[in-house]
Image (tube, rainbow, N blue to C red):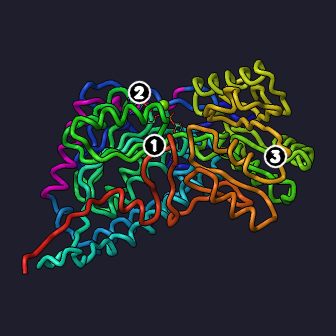
Amino acid sequence: MNAPITVKRLGEDASKFVAKEKKLFIDGQWVPSANGRTIDVIDPATGMIFDRVPDGASEDIDKAVAAARKAFDDGPWATMTPADRGKLVWRLGDLVEKHADELAQLEALDNGKPVTDARMGDVTFSYELLRYMAGWSTKITGQTIPLSSGAPFHAYTLREPVGVCGQIVPWNFSFMMAVWKVAPALAAGCTIVLKPAEQTPLTALRLAELVEEAGFPAGVFNVVTGLGETAGAALAAHPDVDKVAFTGSTEVGKKILDAAKGNLKKVSLELGGKSPMIVFADADPSVAIPAIGYGIFYNMGQTCTAGTRLYVHKDIAPTILAGLKDFAAKMTIGVGLDPATQIGPLVSQEQFDRVRGYIQAGLDDGATLLCGGGRFGAEGYFLEPTILTETEPHMSVVREEIFGPVLVVATFDDDGFEEIVREANNSIYGLAASVFTRDVSRAHKVAKKLKAGTIGVNTHHVIDPALPFGGFNQSGWGREQGYEAILLYTEVKSVGVAL
Ligand code: NAP
Ligand code: MG
């Protein structure tokens, strides 16, 4: 491990941003929080405080929602043509690309993730998504509907923006999760109050600067940094918010639902996962091993779609497990800001303790440690990539979302697939799943049977701006990406004209 003061590794632009005093972005203005308090921002590679952001709470949320309401109801945004709206969203994509290295560095410092992944993954996906959604601005349409009763009406539907959107995002892909929500909402003509996670607030504030630079009207996009229990809860419950979009844990997702009840605001939820990966005896190990390795260890396993449960046929298990052990051993562990790093620290002490607690629970329950399990280095929240074998369905490591670099493995000897698919589907979650086989027919049959929002065949992580993303079961409500995301941010209105 290298320099303890990782902040020194930032480029000039990111350094300048970190050095700035942080404020909330409300109605096109940079303002302190009403209570004047701040939250410390911690570098997970060292555990040291390197910045502070406003501790926004309900009074700030009220102001931000009022600004978003005004911008939605009567600002220039309300009358802007779809083409002009699309141009602004595209311009925001261009600005994100222009500042991609800086954004990736800020994310790597704040979250701990490998800067190369942040640049090639989070930030690249974000500007591509902004451009993809910009294109939808001019293509949102209703339908002309022939009435089934033959009533003498000319009937049609209008598809209109849903209104003021509260958007609450987690720390694992903080910038990208924000853009996943912001891009379709802006393309659809909504206005936004965004609440980033307390652990990783920086890139949302930098995004607000870019929104300002792109030339969006005041009040269209607002950012309130703060805690979930205060700022987040106030936003989810606010009577003047028309929709709340949340990404985070299933537990907090249920609280969002409760909070949304007051005015029955629309709700979309992207929640946790415990995604299975099934490897049949005919799988190609040279394909399966790296796909499974990245499937679990990408972003230190702090990925909602992470392939966390591996079911491998006993005939191929020795080859796959030896390959995965080798894959894990070769991953470069280090500070996120080092471009060679593949495994950075976990996001916080809390997360580090939680993940280690799960590993210990798995061992106590009788699982076998194939590799990892230990702390790496003397400071920060580094954990070795970990594989537990000989796991059983009842163990907490198999049932619960760990959200860390921990793969749990079980073998099977069924040459069909019904039984193993049933086991793979035996979860409260249903976000992603994958199957590895050279049998095309079996691949399609298994893909059809798996209960998850995204299925990989001979690959695990499958995401694209055009491809719907979301969860079955308790992994969520609604789909982001693609045209589905536009549907999440619009309402349908039926109009009948008496003829
Ligand atoms: P989290 O604790 O649920 O927090 C997510 C966000 O909700 C944060 O901004 C948090 O604020 C806020 N929050 C907390 N309590 C709240 C409340 N009572 N009312 C309103 N907002 C509240 O999740 P996390 O630990 O940050 O992220 C990890 C989770 O996200 C995992 O379960 C993961 O699977 C899930 N995730 C899902 C997807 C997906 O697309 N399905 C993608 C990424 C992550 P604070 O930061 O202040 O707590
Ligand atoms: Mg949290």
Whether residue 261 is visible to the viewer of this picture, yes or no, is yes
Mark sitting on residue 39: 2
Q: Residue at x 80, y 22 (%)?
A: 366
* Secondary structure under the numbered disc 1 in the rendered image: strand
Task: Mark 2 or mark 1: name the one nearer the start of the chain.
Answer: 2
Please give the residue where the numbered disc 3 appears in the rendered image.
312
Bin the neighbour count of mark 2 within 10 Å (Cα to Cα): few under 14, some 14-19, many 20 and up.
some
Q: Residue furthest top?
A: 364
Depth check: 118 or 494 in front? 494
Quadrant of image for the C terminus:
bottom left
Residue 210 picture location, percent across and down: 38, 56
Whether residue 286 is visible to the viewer of this picture, yes or no, is no
Mark sitting on residue 291: none
To which quarter of the image does residue 240 belong? top left
Q: Is residue 43 above or below residue 441?
A: above
Ligand 1 has an atom within 8 Å of the beta carbon of the residue at disc 1? yes
Q: Residue furthest left?
A: 498
Residue 202 picture location, percent across and down: 45, 41
Alpha carbon separation for disc pair 3 and 2: 45 Å
Q: Is residue 249 left or right of residue 121?
A: left
* Secondary structure under the numbered disc 3 in the rendered image: strand
Point out the frontmost of discs 3 and 2.
3
Task: Mark 3 or mark 2: name the one nearer the start of the chain.
Answer: 2
Point out the frontmost of discs 2 and 1.
1
Q: Is residue 361 above or below residue 180?
A: above
Question: Magenta stretch containing residue 139, yes or no?
Answer: no
Mark sitting on residue 247: 1
Q: Which residues are magenta?
A: 49-74
Q: Is residue 241 above or below residue 440?
A: above
To which quarter of the image does residue 110 belong? top right
